[in-house]
Image: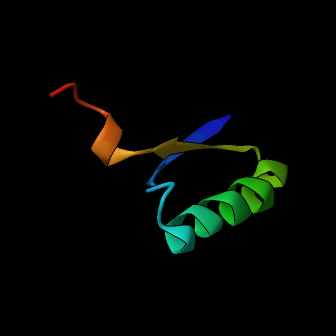
Amino acid sequence: MKKLAISISPHVSGPYTQYLNLKKGLIKYDWEVIGVSLNQCCPK
């Protein structure tokens, strides 16, 4: 299975919707879409 990491911001609807559509669309092509939220990655 190939992996695709995509940057998402859950509080912004546009990129998050795009992520969900990609996840649903690419799963049939054996891709695993991983959502990466940049603003939650690092403890302050």
**For this view, does 2 lie left or right of residue 12?**
right
The answer to which image quadrant residue 3 occupies is top right
Q: Viewer-proximal residue, 42 or 22? A: 42
Q: Which residue lies furthest to the left in this view?
A: 44
Q: Where is residue 21 in the image (x, y as percent from the top left)?
A: 72, 65
- The image shows residue 44 at horizontal and vertical percentages of 14, 28
The vertical placement of 39 against 21, above or below, is: above
Instruction: Place residue 9 in its image quadrant.
Output: bottom left
Q: How many labels does the image show?
A: 0
Q: Which of the 4 image quadrants contains residue 24?
A: bottom right
Question: In the image, is 6 to the left or to the right of 20?
Answer: left
Please give left or right for residue 42 compared with residue 22 in the image: left
Query: Coloring scheme of the render?
Result: rainbow
Which residue is found at the position 73% from the left and 56% from the top? 26
Comparing 43 with 17, the one in front is 43
Q: Name the residue at 85% across, 52% down.
A: 28
Furthest residue toward top: 43
- Residue 22 picture location, percent across and down: 67, 62
Q: Residue at x 30, y 33 (%)?
A: 41
Residue 8 vs residue 24: left or right?
Answer: left
* Residue 34 image position (x, y, % from top left): 55, 41
Tell which residue pokes out farthest to the bottom in this image: 14
Q: Is residue 14 above or below residue 1?
A: below
In this picture, is 34 found above or below 20? above
